[in-house]
Image: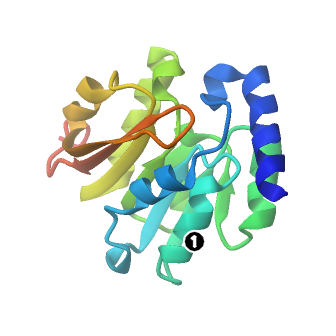
Amino acid sequence: MRAMQEKLLFLYKFMRTPKQIGSVTPSSTFLARKMLEPVPWSKVASVVELGAGTGAITRHMDAVRRRDTTVLLFEQDPHLLSRLKEAFPDYACHEDACGLRNALKETGIDRLDCVLSGLPFFNFPHQLREQIMQEVTAALRPGGLFIAFQYSQQMRKRLSRDFEIEHIHFVPLNVPPAFVYVCRKKEASSHEL
């Protein structure tokens, strides 16, 4: 029943703001598993999920993370953000991914081990996309993981500027089918020099 409600809510949100939501349905279990598979959870002290939506990936992360891992969730839609706060009361929830570094300061985190992203980057205006990518790059520790799903490979060139792209997995069992980018932050990013 909850899954059907989430799908209907997601469809409604997509119809109202397609450039912000990016998909007609929440991420599938197959996509969530592919996103979380490369993360060495026993070594992750802090993780951020951008574009947490209805919590489709968050629920899977909650099952595999260490209990002492600090988790921050970002979701711009106020209704979805409110639902995330209810479902995950132990996680810090924030609205604006452009304020990622400020949120880390508030939480007392110096650098992140991992950033997971479901943001539809290619739908965003260039300036917004760049601002979020700069926040992510600056917030991740050298060697930290950035794992993002996209519905095309159009972000490949942009991601390769700050990250070593270790893998791009195709996940056909998702609506729409998705690509999962597994990226590692380069040891010396151009934003830190």
Residue 78 seen from this side: no
Q: Is residue 179 above or below residue 44?
A: above
Residue 151 in which image quadrant? top left
188 left or right of 56 in image: left
- Work out whether residue 103 or residue 27 is closer to the camera in this orientation and state it: 27
The residue labelled by disc 1 is: 62
On the rendered image, what quadrant is the C terminus found in? top left
Q: Residue at x 47, y 28 (%)?
A: 121
Q: Residue at x 62, y 40 (%)?
A: 96
Coloring scheme used: rainbow
On the rendered image, what quadrant is the N terminus found in? bottom right
Horizontal and vertical percent position of residue 169? 31, 44
Q: Is residue 39 above or below residue 129?
A: below
Residue 165 in which image quadrant? top left
Horizontal and vertical percent position of residue 190? 19, 36
Residue 10 in which image quadrant? top right
Residue 190 seen from this side: yes
- Work out whether residue 106 or residue 123 is closer to the camera in this orientation and state it: 123
Secondary structure under tag 1 reads helix
Horizontal and vertical percent position of residue 14? 72, 27
Q: Is residue 137 above or below residue 152?
A: below
Q: Is residue 179 above or below residue 145?
A: above
- Work out whether residue 136 or residue 154 is closer to the camera in this orientation and state it: 154
102 left or right of 46 in image: right
